[in-house]
Each structure stands twice: as C-alpha cells, then as structure tokens.
Amino acid sequence: MMGRVTRLVFWGWLTLLACAVTAGPATASTSLSVCMIRAAPGMTPQALFVDPGRFDCVTPQKHFGRGDFWLLSQPLPDLTADHPPFSVRFAGMWRERTTLYTLYADGAIERSSFTSRTTGQFLRPGGMIRMPLAERAAPPVRLLWHIRGAGNMRGVLVEPTLVDRPEGDRTELLFAIFYASFAGMAVALIVYNLALWAALRQGFQPVYCLMLLSLICYSIMSSGAIGLWWPGIDNELRLRLAGFFLGTSGASVLLFARFFFERRVFAGWLAWATDLVMVALVGSTAIFALLAPWHINALDNAVTISFLLLAIVVLAILVQAWRRRSNYLWLFAIAWGVPIVMGCFRIASSFGLVRWHIWTDHSTILAMALEAVLSSLGIAYRIRLLSRERDQAREQEVVARELADVDPLTGLFNRRAFLRQAIGRPGAQTLLIADLDHFKHINETIGHDGGDEVLRSFARALSAAVPAGALVARIGGEEFAVVGDADAGAGAGAGPGIDGPAILHALRHARMPFDLTVTCSIGTCTGPLLREADWKALYRDADRALYAAKAAGRDRARDATTSPVAA
C-alpha cells in the first residue's frame, strides 16, 4: 500500500513540475508596457488618448501609492482581421473598479468595465483577469485603463498582456491542470493519512491533513476557481480569504514540524519562537482579511514580514535538527529547500526587489505543493521507523513476558505461569508434586551455590521423565509440580500417563552434582482442572499424598486417587 501511494505522489509531483515548466511564455501573446498618471477631475478617455505625453512612463507603479489612476498602453502591434479575437490579460490585484477603453484605428472607442463585486465574469484560472476586445472592422491600436480604489501593493496594473483566444485558452488550461493536479493529490494524501491515523494515532498525521486542507482552500481562492462555483463573489473577499488560508498553511507547516520532529529539536527558545511565528502568521492574515482595505499597505507589509519570519524559523528548525541529530533532518531539508527558496523570491517580490511574474505570484502554491508531496515521503519514512520500533518493542515485550513466566534458576515455569496454563485444560488431569528430601542438609553440606546446581539438575531430570505435553514448574523453594493428561503416554520408559513411581525411578538414576545421592517424595492426584476451585481441590489432595510419602520414610510416591489419604 505504501509503495502504491508513493508512486502516486511521485507521478503527481512530476505532473506539477511539467505544468510549471510548460507554462512558459506563449508565442501568440504580447507583453504591454504601460504609462501611468494619477486620476484627476475632468480627465476623459478622448483627451488622454490624444495627449499620451501626460503619462509617467518611468516611475515604478508602487511609488504612486493608493488611489485612482489612468494607465495607457504602448501602441498595439498590427492586428489584422485574419487574427482570432484578442483579449487583454492582467493580474487580479486589489481594486474597486476597472474600466478598459479600447481605441480603434477608425477613431472609435469601446468601453468595458467591472467592479470588485462583478470581477467573476472576467476571472480566469490562475487568478488572472481576461477582458475580450470588441471585434470591429478596424483593428485596435491602443488601450487605456481607468482604475479606481487601487491598493497598489504590487502595482496597479501588473503584467498586462495581449493574447489571442487559443493562447488564452492554453494558459488557462495549464493553470487548471496545475491546480487540479495539486488538489487531487492533496485530497488523496488527506484520505490516506486519515486512514493511517485511525490505526497509528500519530499526532503529526491530522496536522499534516490540516496543512493540506489549508493549501487546498488557498489554491481555490488564489487560482480563481472559487469563481466557477460562486460567480458573484467579491474579488476583494477572494483576496482576503486567500491571504488568510495562506497564513494558516504557513502556521500548519510549523505545527506539523512540531509534531513530526523529535521533542529535543524544539527544546528551549525554538519552541516559543515557533509559537510566536504561528501566531504572527494567523494573526496578521486574519487582521488583513477583516480590516482591508483600511491601511492596506501596512497590513500587507505585516503579512509579508510574518512570512519572512516563517522562512527564518524554518531555517532555525533545520539547523537545530542538525545540531540535535534528528533522524528526519535529511528528508525535511529536501522537502523544505524548494519552499524556502521560492518563499524568498515571493518575499523579495513583495518588497519590490524582484520583478513580478505570473509564476512568481503562484510560486507559493508550487512550493507548498512540492513540500506537501515530499513531506508525504517523510511521513512514509517516519511510519517505517515507527513500525520498526513497534516490532522491536513487541519482541522485547515477548521476551519480557517469557522472562516473567520463567523461574530464573531452573528455566521452568514459575507458579503464576504454571497456573495460567494449567487451569482450563480439558479432560482428566494428573497433578504431580515432587519435593526434594532433606534439601536443607544438602545446602549445609555443599553450600547454597551447590544447592542451586542440584535444583537445576533435578529440574532437567524431571522434565526428561514426564510425558510430552506435560507442564513442569517450580512452585516453591524445592517443590516442583507437573500437570498432564491422565491418559497421555509417558516418556523415558515410564508407564502410561503421569506415573509417580515411574518418574521417581527415573529421578533416582539421574546424575546429581558432586555425585550426591538426592531423593524426593512425590504425591499425585487425578481429576478435572477446568476452574480454580478444581486446582485447589487437586492440589490439596496431591499435597496430602506428598506428606503421606514423607511420613512413610521419603523417597517414595503416593497417589491420592487410588489410595485416598486421610486428612
């Protein structure tokens, strides 16, 4: 099962990479450079088309801050009637209203617009806005945007591109494949890990599922897929929710690391630093979602700083794992390497240090997709270690249980293990109790070490003399017990069943340490042994027979079943 899931994850990963690599610049698209001017009362599209010199083509868009703006494109390339219908595509940034004016070669101006609440009609996979240009006999020659309420956190009009219909459809299909591949893979991993969690009960598994669920929600919002199910969603609400789910994704990554790595990795300052960063991620994105567009640039900077802290604390976790010799460092270094690098690019883009690109904006989901896939391999490795640890623990438990059931001196069952296995045996059972004669004198003669050796030799001789399948135990200092089926064939030349005199004869001929002559007295009794009460009755009668043998001069056997002994 683990091998099949690993292969599924591997091919899903390759699909994501293929989507990212193949979604490069298209041949039938033209990037547009735009010039910008802050909106003022009295400005009209006709006047602005006539006077392009009023626009600033040098100052970066972010330097203008928030507000209302006009943006004028460069002259469009020659678009003849043979070309398919064209659209203009740009990033779906924070804005209240966007109006596009298209100037045609015959002097006509066409107008189309949308608000934040009506963005859904132009929102496409990848979170891009795609506005079609009206088809006229004369080709379009220039574009003019009037954007009101722009947040201008990454720019007012980012990556405007003129695309024909086949190219636009191709790019949207690639985005759809990319996000669908990630979502399908994430759902499969969630189901698989929840199933494993039901069996293993490891804390990192539900946290990993929480991380994947947050990433799925983020991908639905950032990709614009939410518009397919909720066409009337406000674009500002979509961006708020995307930011919040991105924050919960980052926090769940840290929480997953807390559960996955050994506790020693987070000992000391790293534990509270991780907690602070998780609070910063969830808190900053939640505040952004609730308060934007109020002080939107300050709120956006707070979110960016919290993700910068995330990158720093992830590096600190890897360093600490290396210092504390974590068993999982090598795999997590691979899994988190790509997200760290791509996250740094995203942060640099947020601060204006790196030029925005369509895949820069989607690098977060790509990085987190790779991290989720590689983390699944880490989970597989962790489960493999857990299974190995559990197997070793079970082996140790079996050994410990066996040691707890065995008399350490003779290797026979102890009293507790003997009773556990003896009580409940079906059919008539014969109980034999053997007690060494004058054992105190043996200890005084050859010492306690010699006495221990006598007990071991006697145990070996007794085990060899009883029938196969009989239970043999040491139940007291020099007292031994045997239980076997009353009709079982005896071994070592003994008669049928557990025959006291025959076993006594075999014990007399057993060689003892220091060539000592060691004798014993035996008492036997036959009866049922299904319950504890049966054991007490059987033991009482066999014990009386044993004492009758000792009273008769020792070195002999008595059977309470055939020759009842008076109380």
Image (cartoon, helix red, strand yellow):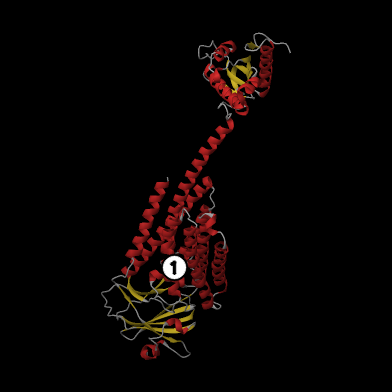
Is residue 492 among what the camera can see? yes
For badge 1, the amino acid type reads: Gly
Q: Is residue 508 above or below residue 104?
A: above
User: Which of the two residues, 489 or 132, is positioned nearer the viewer here?
Assistant: 489
Q: Secondary structure at mark 1?
A: helix
Query: Where's the C terminus, which quadrant?
Result: top right
Residue at image point 56% right, 59% down:
267
Is residue 184 among what the camera can see? no
Residue lying farthest to the top in this orientation: 563
Residue at image point 51% right, 75% down:
301
User: Which of the two residues, 478 or 301, is positioned nearer the viewer here?
Assistant: 478
Quadrant housing residue 345:
bottom left
Q: Is residue 511 left or right of residue 181?
A: right
Question: Residue 393: percent from the left, percent from the top?
Answer: 52, 41
Question: Residue 234: percent from the left, percent from the top?
Answer: 50, 71
Residue linked to disc 1: 343
User: Which of the two residues, 54 or 230, is positioned nearer the viewer here?
Assistant: 54
Question: Residue 466: percent from the left, percent from the top?
Answer: 54, 17
Quadrant housing residue 514:
top right
